[in-house]
Image: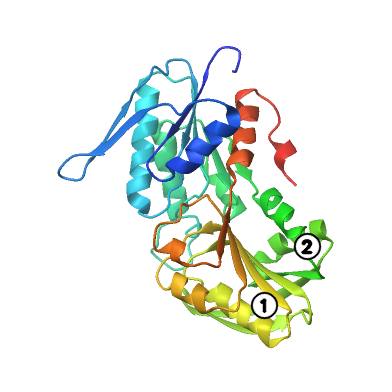
């Protein structure tokens, strides 16, 4: 592929800063794209450079407003397909609708599969994402999916912390992720038993493990309304943790999340820049953003050069 085609990186409107950082790490320029809306709200896309025969990567997390960014991505992919790009890779650091990956009630859609179909029909040849909410979503695609992990970025930060560390899963579903971090940090593992009463509402019940006098890191793939994370943090405080940090790859931060985190027991909340922080989210002084631009840049270079992507996994 790399011998016959140029590498081109484009960005939708969702996270232009991340796309520019990726380009800076690679040493290339961002291919210009016209993105605007007609007066009735329809999206207009025009690729402002020749992409015929090129290996093209479109950076676009489907964060809020989710449907707008998803449609914009589909239209960019279609434009590239009709402009005869050789290969089109959707770089979606955050994959929206990932939590709707199965039928939990009668007569409900499997929305994560519908999104996969949208992208495939639009003309996508490959998908790249980070910390997919449910790994089995990769099976919804009939094309290669690179599910990268933000772990290297966070682990470098955690290794600088002082004192004994324990990694905490805020619910049973995140135990595998927390165990992987704990193994690489040579740290302890704890689990908060959680009972969810309604969507976006969670009640933490009790702690499995010992956090007394330790630095506790509450680990999750995303923080949305922050109910689960803040409840878990309070349980750790009640059980004598010396310091409590939160870590989530995707800072969705909807609804009352900022207010909850401001009032929480966390000394710091670490997130990646898969989703950009708007002005309201930046008001929370506890949030620290770590960039995944270098990770994505390495993955893009390896895919373009037909080299292994698994070497980036930890």
Residue shown at 49%/50% (left/top)? 95
* Quarter that holds the N terminus: top right
Q: Is residue 204 left or right of residue 179?
A: left
* Dot 1 crowding, Cα within 10 Å, few <14, some 14–19, many 20+: many
Q: Is residue 199 visible?
A: no
Q: Is residue 303 placed above or below 278 in the rendered structure? A: above
Q: Position of residue 70 (x, y in %)?
A: 38, 45
- Tag 2 secondary structure: helix
Tell me: 120 left or right of 45. Answer: right
Q: Residue at x 39, y 17 (%)?
A: 50
The residue indicated by pointer 1 is 192
Tell me which residue sits at (45%, 61%) in the image. 282
Depth check, mark 2 against mark 1: the one in front is 2
Badge 1 marks a residue whose secondary structure is: strand
Closer to us: 154 or 77: 154
Residue located farthest toward the left when viewing the structure as drawn: 39
| Residue 285 rendering spot, x and y as whole percentages | 52, 67
Residue neighbourhood size for the residue with mark 2, other residues' Cα within 10 Å, grouped as few (<14), some (14–19), many (≥20): many
Q: Disc 2 and disc 1: Cα gap in Å?
A: 15 Å
Residue 39 drawn at (x, y percent): 15, 43
The residue to which callout 2 is attached is 182
């Amino acid at each position: 592929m790399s011998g016959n085609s140029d590498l081109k990186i484009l960005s939708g409107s969702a996270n232009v800063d991340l796309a520019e950082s990726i380009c800076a790490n690679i040493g290339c320029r961002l291919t210009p794209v016209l993105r605007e809306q007609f007066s009735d709200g329809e999206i207009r896309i025009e690729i402002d450079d020749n992409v015929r025969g090129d290996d093209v990567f479109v950076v676009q997390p489907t964060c809020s407003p989710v449907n707008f960014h998803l449609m914009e991505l589909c239209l960019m992919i279609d434009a590239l397909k009709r402009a005869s790009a050789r290969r089109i890779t959707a770089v979606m650091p955050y994959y929206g609708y990932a939590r709707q990956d199965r039928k939990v009630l009668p007569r409900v859609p499997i929305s994560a599969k519908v999104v996969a179909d949208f992208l495939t029909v639009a003309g996508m040849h490959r998908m790249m994402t980070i910390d997919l909410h449910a790994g089995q979503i990769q099976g919804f695609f009939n094309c290669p999916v690179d599910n990268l992990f933000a772990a290297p970025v966070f682990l470098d930060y955690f290794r600088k912390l002082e004192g004994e560390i324990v990694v905490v899963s805020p619910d049973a579903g995140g135990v595998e992720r927390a165990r992987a971090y704990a193994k690489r940090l040579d740290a302890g593992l704890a689990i908060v038993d959680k009972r969810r009463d309604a969507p976006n509402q969670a009640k933490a019940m009790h702690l499995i493990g010992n956090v007394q006098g330790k630095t506790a890191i509450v680990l999750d793939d995303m923080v949305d309304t922050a109910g689960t994370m803040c409840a878990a943090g309070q349980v750790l405080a009640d059980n004598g943790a010396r310091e409590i940090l939160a870590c989530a790859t995707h800072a969705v931060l909807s609804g009352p999340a900022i207010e909850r985190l401001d009032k929480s027991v966390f000394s710091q909340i670490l997130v990646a820049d898969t989703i950009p922080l708007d002005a309201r989210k930046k008001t929370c002084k506890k949030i620290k953003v770590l960039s995944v631009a270098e990770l994505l840049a390495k993955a893009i270079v390896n895919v373009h050069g037909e080299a292994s992507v698994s070497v980036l996994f930890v």
